[in-house]
Image (spheres, rainbow, N blue to C red):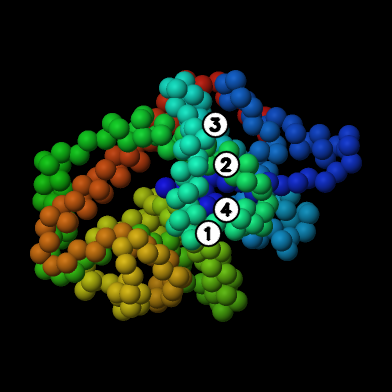
Amino acid sequence: MKLLRVFIFIIFVFMSHAGSQAGILLDRVVAVVNQDVITWSDLYKAMEFEASDKMRDLKDEEKRKLFKENEVVFLENLIDMKLQLQAAKQSGIEATPEDVNEAIADIKKKYSVDEKALIESLKKEGFSFEEYRKKLAEQIVLSRVVSQHVKGKIVVSPNEIEKYLKENKDALGDSTAYRIRQIFFKKPGSSSDRKALEERADEIFRKLEAGEDFTSLAQKYSEDPSGKSGGDLGFVKSRYLAKEFLDVISNMKTGDISRPFWTDKGLHIVKLEEKSEAGNEAEIKEAVRNKLVEKQFSEKYKGWVKELRENAYIEIRL
């Protein structure tokens, strides 16, 4: 389940005089996706959300430059999401008010907050409870349409698992192994750069604390080759881990995410996916199955989105 801030864009209030050129630009169409449009304000909200912590100290000129540099990437993401929502509508997939109520109940339970505290938290983020409900409904629909068109078509056979184990014999071993994801930043050259990097890592850690998806953030920010696969390092035996890693991971439970920490290579944020004790072959086989499922999901998801794009009318007006 995605949590508090996933797929929730901060609502940006643009204060301007009626009829001003800025107001016209805010509402102009930047893309047409079949029968739907994406406006410049939709794009701005997406960028504002990602850059929210950095935005506070930026001058207007610096903000415009930042947005200009990133608007193409964000627009492509919005187009993909719009196409998936359209596919859901065509398949009759929807989220009822009861579905949203259940999702909110889960969030309140996880964070031990009542509705009043949740509403106050939303206000601080800049949007209303009704806006939040709408975005949660979209997230539920997206999850369901992906399950139907992608996850439901994934099959991993016992033969595939055995083949993987034969080709990766080190996956079975005689020591404790950890399945780890990481977001990694290379060690900078100067102390000033080091401080800036720590601030950047802290910002990403806050996003993770707020419920953003580790895999997605690893793909976006990690400077390690594993970032392309969501930061997945697979199972790593304890004897191969640096002391700093072991000191952190030994105090973590499955699903925990560490605060940023340094090794001689750079700065790391890690998520402990699984822990396998010595000789537990069944658990490792299950972990291999999960890894193969994830690989298939990535391939099938990309193929599905590509197919949606090929069969759609898309006009970009940036």
Q: Residue at x 21, y 66 (%)?
A: 177
Q: Quadrant of residue 193?
A: bottom right
Q: Earlier in the sequence, mark 4 or mark 2?
A: 4
Is residue 107 in view from this perspective?
A: yes
Q: Secondary structure at mark 4?
A: helix
Find disc 3 in the rendering and name its residue: 82
95 lies above or below 286: above
Q: Which x, y percent locates residue 94?
A: 47, 29
Q: Which x, y percent locates residue 46?
A: 62, 45
Q: Earlier in the sequence, mark 1 or mark 3?
A: 3
Q: What's the residue type where badge 2 is placed?
A: Arg
Q: Nearer the viewer, residue 94 or 6?
A: 94
Find disc 2 in the rendering and name its residue: 133
Disc 1 + disc 2, Cβ < 8 Å: no
Disc 1 + disc 3, Cβ < 8 Å: no
Q: What's the residue type where badge 1 is placed?
A: Val
Q: What's the residue type where badge 3 is placed?
A: Lys
Q: Secondary structure at mark 2?
A: helix
Q: Which x, y percent locates residue 2?
A: 45, 48
Question: Would residue 192 appear left or right of 59 to someone viewing this image?
Answer: left
Q: What's the residue type where badge 4 is placed?
A: Glu
Q: CA distance from mark 1 to mark 3?
A: 32 Å
Q: Residue at x 36, y 30 (%)?
A: 148
Q: Residue at x 48, y 52 (%)?
A: 107
Other-residue count near label 3 (Cα within 10 Å), few / some / many at <14 / 14–19 / ≥20: some
Disc 4 + disc 1, Cβ < 8 Å: no
Q: CA distance from mark 3 to mark 4?
A: 30 Å
Q: Earlier in the sequence, mark 3 or mark 4?
A: 3
Q: Quadrant of the C terminus?
A: top right
Q: Earlier in the sequence, mark 3 or mark 2?
A: 3
Find disc 1 in the rendering and name its residue: 113
Other-residue count near label 4 (Cα within 10 Å), few / some / many at <14 / 14–19 / ≥20: few
